[in-house]
Amino acid sequence: MAGTIAVYPGMFDPVTNGHLDLIERGVRIFDRLIVAVVTNPRKTPLFSIDERLDMLREATKGMGDIELDAFDGLLVRYVRQKKANVILRGLRAVSDFEYEFEMALTNRQMASDIETVFMAPNLEYIYLRARLVKEVARYNGDVSHYAPDYVVKKLKEKFHF
Amino acid sequence: MAGTIAVYPGMFDPVTNGHLDLIERGVRIFDRLIVAVVTNPRKTPLFSIDERLDMLREATKGMGDIELDAFDGLLVRYVRQKKANVILRGLRAVSDFEYEFEMALTNRQMASDIETVFMAPNLEYIYLRARLVKEVARYNGDVSHYAPDYVVKKLKEKFHF
Amino acid sequence: MAGTIAVYPGMFDPVTNGHLDLIERGVRIFDRLIVAVVTNPRKTPLFSIDERLDMLREATKGMGDIELDAFDGLLVRYVRQKKANVILRGLRAVSDFEYEFEMALTNRQMASDIETVFMAPNLEYIYLRARLVKEVARYNGDVSHYAPDYVVKKLKEKFHF
Amino acid sequence: MAGTIAVYPGMFDPVTNGHLDLIERGVRIFDRLIVAVVTNPRKTPLFSIDERLDMLREATKGMGDIELDAFDGLLVRYVRQKKANVILRGLRAVSDFEYEFEMALTNRQMASDIETVFMAPNLEYIYLRARLVKEVARYNGDVSHYAPDYVVKKLKEKFHF
Amino acid sequence: MAGTIAVYPGMFDPVTNGHLDLIERGVRIFDRLIVAVVTNPRKTPLFSIDERLDMLREATKGMGDIELDAFDGLLVRYVRQKKANVILRGLRAVSDFEYEFEMALTNRQMASDIETVFMAPNLEYIYLRARLVKEVARYNGDVSHYAPDYVVKKLKEKFHF
Amino acid sequence: MAGTIAVYPGMFDPVTNGHLDLIERGVRIFDRLIVAVVTNPRKTPLFSIDERLDMLREATKGMGDIELDAFDGLLVRYVRQKKANVILRGLRAVSDFEYEFEMALTNRQMASDIETVFMAPNLEYIYLRARLVKEVARYNGDVSHYAPDYVVKKLKEKFHF
């Protein structure tokens, strides 16, 4: 086997400690890891693509050989274009599970040579969602347990400057 | 990264097409794959360890570099002894999901350097269980869709010779 | 369409108000309904086949054209032999759902001309299981809400005569 | 029993192979089947009622005695008006299950003489959703496995003419 | 222990018999119960805060020592300000379960001295949602089984005056 | 309200840190807490009633006003006999949820004046089961994260003396 290249796609709006935990695990297992921000024109994220990439860059410093990127369109097309063969996804709860399965099996239908691989985040991040982090930050609650310092700072600027 | 060695543990009582599907996927992604039959003294499998290894050997011929083995005791201890760093598990349904999570998080608690990685089998095997194959074979039903020919033959010998 | 004949298989150990509720719904929808007691040699039911059929007979009196029967072996083989084309099953909870799906899809694999049809019992029986009725009756608890009088009487005889 | 008339309600935006699979199963079991497009003023479907009925007409040609219709307002009121006694629904995954149960039990509360009956689609359509088909088609992905040719053509016209 | 004060937060848009059932259970167990309407500026409820409080007042008359209130911002901050130590939540179905767990564990992370306590509503309200009540009322369906008379009247005024 | 007395029933075979976490939460919320070991003649626990009570006594020292007891027969009968009005249960995962709901609603059917109240354990114990602790200890794995020292010692004596 020549080497396994994995793409870890997500909104990362913003990156949380749960995402970072998964990135660390992915780096340990795959030969190369590409963290790819989804740019979906029909969603309205809190942070722009540039802000999300910026926070990811800051948060993954020193974590090893990680490529940060953004893409739109079909995930499997992007994975192929990057000559990757694995999609990495975190699995946390039953509600995730069915959505993730739906996506994984649809992607496999379109590209049978690409595998989706699931990993569990650290237990303390198992109920952590970016949506919840934003909700708590919006009300000026403490989110330092859920996101790296730089992201906490950016959330404060967004909601309370 | 030097190379990822994965252990795929299971009862394989007997090996089904669902297991084989996962083995094929594992071979494509990991540098080396060890398929390890669990020998649990408190369970009473239909086939002996030797029979199970024999069926696995027959079924995985030509599938690539796969090591077949058996072990008892703690899985993480076995994984370490084999100098592997990944446990591979199939995920099919919600009921699997919670049991598998429980196992993965317990194993991580005992050995934080070993990662459990989940993959989905081919859609047509998503509701396939070895227990069901045995149940159908016992009543002389057709299980050729669920298991390789050699296993179908061994099931017939077990129940109807 | 000539007429839909449905088989409602189960252990009925013993028949509960939840089963009866489903039988009533089945009678309204299908041209003929066969209630078929499973005789699984590897399970140890509380009541014998004859006792279970006897309780079913008593409980379904006046409910319409219902055939009571017992069978062993593969369900789809029995359904075909009865020239039926539908298997009726109750669905109550998520844990049921996956097991029932597994069975339905396995049966379809073996006999694509036979359909499994699911119905929900009355809301008040949605968490009712025969196992629980036996557990409560064993400790002399009141099960009159869960089973018809005749069954309650038989449970008392079994546990406390 | 005089005859069972079933209504299969849905958005059908657009009709997929999963819907068609269920329609075929329904035709085999019920005396008459009415496929009824829901016209919910608070949702913004991709296709108009007329387009959806047109695609259904094309896709169900030769499938037997199927009535195609559209309705708004309460489902049980529509079912009664059509003198039907069964609502047919597909069940695919656990997440469906709870929503469908909620609807079935609410409808039963309003009309106890109408039964909801669930069937499983073919295994290969078990993770198929109209939403996903639209998402893939929007990005010019191949959806020919998920929908009949005529629908694939209409999706292309919608997104890429 | 000095006394347990519980806050039961919710949208109550409008209050249903399921909510009232839980309020009655909470009153029996806790020393004091505060029913707190959430005022989330990013949601568009059918009824105003004042209307929702008005319906709650009418519906909880004579139910014992209940305080009705509204709040915005972080729930745990509100609970502390009221010197309460318990958050009361109803649990109905699996889909609720994961969302509720996510909220309970996030709240515990922010305020480890506040406990979330779950209770099951009466079985007949287990699939009841305020969203469904509004949907049925909008189409002039009968919702008298799901909500107290005063709320039924207010729903009629809202949709059909 | 005179005071809420809660019974926390369980096998406690053996008591784990997850149980202790729930006991601590129960003590904070209820006026009195009775921890009651279930003595089910049809199960074969690893530890005797006396051993389980002994470990509970050791583990709950200094935790406040807790009564330790054992009972057999119907739970609701025991709760009434202790003049308690609440049953306390931990909720961890979806698979728990349905079983617990089934029990809670059955108990309510038999005794409508007794409420079942659910609480979530600390996140780190959310996938912890006594069965798993025994499994790991049997193979001489480290269980010090899952159970108090005294229990770890007793497990060692049981499996390896």
Image (spheres, coloured by chain):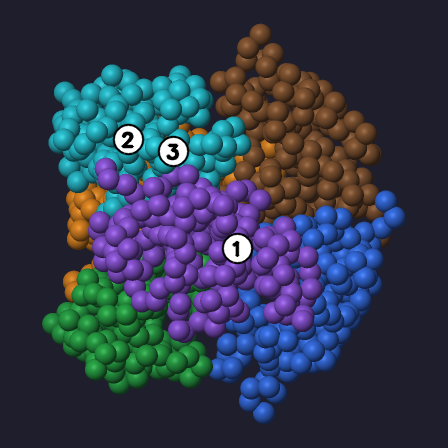
Chain colours: A purple, B cyan, C orange, D green, E blue, F brown
The residues tagged by marks 3 and 1 sit, at their Cα atoms, a distance apart of 28 Å
**Quadrant, the C terminus of chain F:** top right
Q: Which residue is mark 2?
A: B32
Q: Residues within 10 Å of mark 1 (few under 14, many from 20)?
A: some
Q: Secondary structure at mark 1?
A: helix
Q: Are marks 3 and 1 in contact (CB under 8 Å)?
A: no
Q: Position of residue A23 (x, y in %)?
A: 45, 47
Answer yes or no: is residue D5 visible: no
The answer to whether F43 is drawn above or below residue A154 in the figure is: above
Q: Are marks 3 and 1 on the same chain?
A: no
Type of amino acid at the residue the image marks with label 1: Glu
**Sequence-first tag of 2 and 3:** 2
Which mark, residue B86?
3
Q: Rounded to the nearest whole Å, what is the CA distance between mark 2 and mark 3?
A: 10 Å
Q: Is residue A18 left or right of residue D24?
A: right
* Residue density around tag 2, few if under 14, some if 14–19, many if 20 or more, within 10 Å: some
- The amino acid marked with disc number 3 is Val
